[in-house]
Amino acid sequence: MCKTAEQIKELSVLCERVLADKQITATLDQVTTTIINAYKTGNKTIFCGNGGSAAEAQHLAAELSGKFNFERRPIPAEACHVNSSFVTAVSNDYDFTQVYSRHIDGFGCKGDILIGLSTSGTSENIVNAFKTAQTKGLTTVALTGKTGGALDALSDFIIKVPSENVPRIQEIHLLVGHIICEKVEKALFGDEH
């Protein structure tokens, strides 16, 4: 089998493992319900990640704040890193490990949802953001790899992708994020379409 086919097969096998894991699917349903309820009470969703996970965080925030499958009003969602002046100022004046926790401290409100994407679960800036979120009454949701890392103990909900392969974990994170966006959009706006 060629390398390309092996990579596709690896993702396919991982998808099957995720599908068969009742804990993952149950947690995904609980997370979705929690986000829907947060929006119904006027709260928002905040995402954070680093590197490729930052790109996914921003992408998923755009799916919620823009639209996913159909025309509807926007709902509040944003990724912590999108204000480059804030990110670089905090990184310079404090350090990068504080950049997301300061964002949550400044913009997070009780009842908001914080979703952190970290394949290792040990990214210090995300760990610090979850600690701050806990003190402020946000619900914390972690999307990680196999072990969950430090985020395991700091999360109200955690979805641990059963893999150590970073690209495959990120691909499942995107799938999970898209499922959340689709269900949230349908629950909040489905009657309009």
Image (spheres, helix red, strand yellow):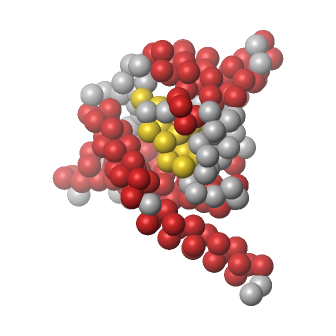
| Viewer-side residue, 176 vs 93 | 176
With respect to residue 18, does 23 lie above or below? above
Residue drawn at the location 33% of the way across and 38% of the way down: 34
Q: Quadrant of the N terminus?
A: bottom right
Residue 123 location in percent, x, y?
69, 34
| Viewer-side residue, 125 vs 121 | 121
In the visual, does 5 lie left or right of 162? Answer: right
**Residue situated furthest left in the rendering:** 191
Residue 14 location in percent, x, y?
57, 67
In the visual, does 37 lie left or right of 176? Answer: left
Residue drawn at the location 54% of the way across and 49% of the way down: 160
**Residue situated furthest bottom in the rendering:** 1
With respect to residue 125, does 2 lie above or below? below
Q: Quadrant of the C terminus?
A: bottom left
Is residue 24 in sight in this rendering? yes
Residue drawn at the location 38% of the way across and 43% of the way down: 31
Residue 10 location in percent, x, y?
65, 72
> In the rendered image, which quarter is residue 131 located in?
top right
Is residue 61 in sight in this rendering? no
**Residue situated furthest top in the rendering:** 93
Say how many tags the image has: 0
In the visual, does 165 lie left or right of 113? Answer: right
Residue 134 location in percent, x, y?
48, 21
